[in-house]
């Protein structure tokens, strides 16, 4: 899907369609608005499929599914049925990522070549990477929590607890007759 979106759809939107639409335009603002609309449409398509794939992954793990195609269809059904909540959560998580990138852009200094400043920049970059991965995990956790709260319940999603059988010695002790006094 991503190969099709970036290979065919992106080329069609920004090479073929965009070029035809601006061929006789004389106003630069209109051309910029058309390009922005194309990016908004392309971004919406990416988000749409990304959300479906996320919930397909969640369904594979939570429901212990064996079929990725079945999970994909189930993920699409979940997104369709809970579109408002799914979109709101996606936007909230996306906003957290944008805030992290903005914060990193504000506090990251230029790259000094020597001294303590170099180590500070390195540590700041590493902290940014860790926080980015943390947000990715929060993203999946919040989507999983939404799925479980909207559709699933504990008996449905949780596997039966594993109970190991007692050893023969323990079983014989438990089943033994009480000894006379």
Image: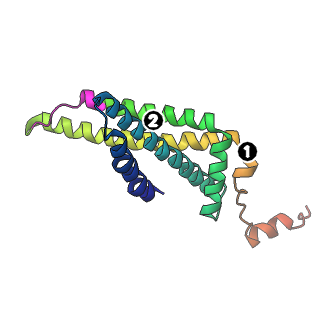
Residue at point 36%, 50% (across, down): 16
Residue 181's place in the image compared with 111, above or below, is below
Quadrant placement of the C terminus: bottom right
Residue at point 54%, 49% (across, down): 54
- Nearer to the camera, 68 or 32: 32
Element type at mark 1: loop
- Nearer to the camera, 34 or 121: 34
Q: Residues within 10 Å of mark 1 (few under 14, many from 20)?
A: few
Mark sitting earlier along the chain (2/1): 2
Residue 148's place in the image compared with 173, above or below, is above
Viewed as shown, does residue 8 lie left or right of 88?
Answer: left
Q: Which residue is mark 2?
A: 94
Counting from the top left corner in percent of width and height, residue 25 is at 31, 34
Element type at mark 2: helix
Task: Give the colour scheme of this rendering.
Answer: rainbow
Residue at point 43%, 44% (across, down): 42
Q: Residues within 10 Å of mark 2 (few under 14, many from 20)?
A: some
**Residue range of the region highlighted in magenta in the rendering:** 104-112
């Amino acid at each position: 899907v991503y190969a099709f979106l970036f290979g065919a759809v992106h080329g069609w939107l920004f090479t073929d369609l965009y070029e035809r639409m601006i061929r006789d335009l004389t106003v630069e603002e209109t051309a910029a608005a058309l390009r922005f609309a194309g990016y908004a449409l392309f971004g919406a398509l990416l988000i749409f499929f990304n959300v479906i794939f996320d919930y397909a992954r969640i369904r594979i793990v939570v429901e212990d599914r064996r079929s990725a195609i079945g999970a994909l269809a189930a993920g699409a059904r979940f997104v369709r049925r809970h579109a408002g909540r799914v979109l709101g959560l996606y936007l909230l998580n996306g906003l957290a990522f944008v805030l992290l990138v903005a914060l990193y852009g504000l506090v990251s200094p230029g790259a000094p070549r020597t001294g303590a400043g170099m180590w500070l920049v390195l540590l700041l970059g590493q902290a940014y990477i860790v926080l980015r991965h943390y947000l990715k995990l929060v993203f999946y956790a919040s989507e999983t929590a939404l799925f479980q709260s909207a559709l699933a319940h504990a008996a449905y999603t949780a596997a039966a607890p594993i109970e190991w059988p007692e050893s023969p010695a323990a079983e014989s002790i438990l089943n033994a007759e009480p000894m006379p006094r």
